[in-house]
Amino acid sequence: MTDRRPMIAGNWKMNLSLLEAASLVKSIGEGIQDQGVDVLVAPPFTALGVVKGLIEDTGILLCAQNMHWESYGAYTGEISPAMLSEVGCSHVILGHSERRSLFKETDEMIDLKANAAVESGLIPIICIGETLEEREAGETFEVLKNQLAGSLHHFMNQKRLPLSTILAYEPVWAIGTGRTATPEQAQEVHQFLRESLTESFDANTAQGIRILYGGSVKPDNIKDLISKKDIDGALVGGASLKADSFVQIIRLGE
Ligand code: PGA
């Protein structure tokens, strides 16, 4: 038994108009009671303000999907950590596989971002995951270990990782494909990540950090996934865009 509180996080990606975003978050707020689960939504930047105004009494947490590591300056198109805090974000997703593959973000960049997030009081949700090719070549653990070491480089040097930090294991082959890792496959990786955290930090850190699973999470597979000892919740893409399915996932499929 651990006292890690489950978290269900919705990553809306580049979807929804302002009206749709408002309507979705209202319906989510109405659909949840205190489920004993942290609920978080990550709207596009332009909808953060609107969504913030609608979640005041719901307990829903606000998260951004990305940010830059610098505080201000000539970085056209970028958003700083302080800007996210000012609009009401408590969390920020970093290193999502779409950022890594489509926008060429590297572990070094994720490391800078993770450090900047913590310095600014934001909680990072750091994503890692292997491709299908890497899994089939038997390289899953090696790839993940390298991503972890690269993305947490600064924290590893200091031998200290804030316990609020969240990791998300998202096998690239399971994102948006309808192909979920089996609960056993996911648990195997989560356990490996916790062991790696014990080696790099200590047992207390490894046991305290929440590790979410992401990749085609749906109302009908959340229960089996969350039943696994090292799976502390889910980062949900497609199924977070409909209030019905997201609320069912928050209820852990009940
Ligand atoms: P999906 O996306 O649930 O649509 O597979 C998950 C994610 O990209 O975070």
Image (cartoon, rainbow, N blue to C red):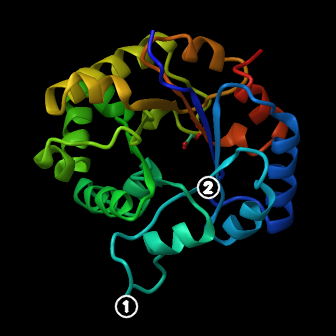
Ligand 1 within 8 Å, label 2 CB = yes
Task: Residue type at mark 1: give it.
Answer: Ala
User: Residue 88: percent from the left, percent from the top?
Assistant: 61, 64
Image position of 2 with respect to 76: above or below: above
- Disc 2 packing (10 Å; few <14; some 14–19; many ≥20): some
Furthest toward the bottom, the residue is: 74
Q: Nearer the viewer, residue 31 or 225?
A: 31
Quadrant (top left/top right/bottom left/bottom right) for the N terminus: top left
Image position of 129 with respect to 22: above or below: above
Q: Residue at x 53, y 68 (%)?
A: 84
Q: Residue at x 48, y 20 (%)?
A: 3
User: Residue 216: percent from the left, percent from the top?
Assistant: 60, 31
The residue beneath circle 1 is 74
Q: Could you tell me if residue 157 is visible in this image?
A: yes
Rounded to the nearest angstrom, the CA distance separating label 1 from label 2 is 25 Å
Circle 1: element type: loop
Quadrant (top left/top right/bottom left/bottom right) for the C terminus: top right
Furthest toward the left, the residue is: 157
The residue beneath circle 2 is 13
Image position of 217 with respect to 103: above or below: above
Q: Residue at x 64, y 20 (%)?
A: 222
Task: Residue type at mark 2: give it.
Answer: Lys
Q: Residue at x 56, y 31 (%)?
A: 234
Mark 1 or mark 2, which has the lower sequence index?
A: 2
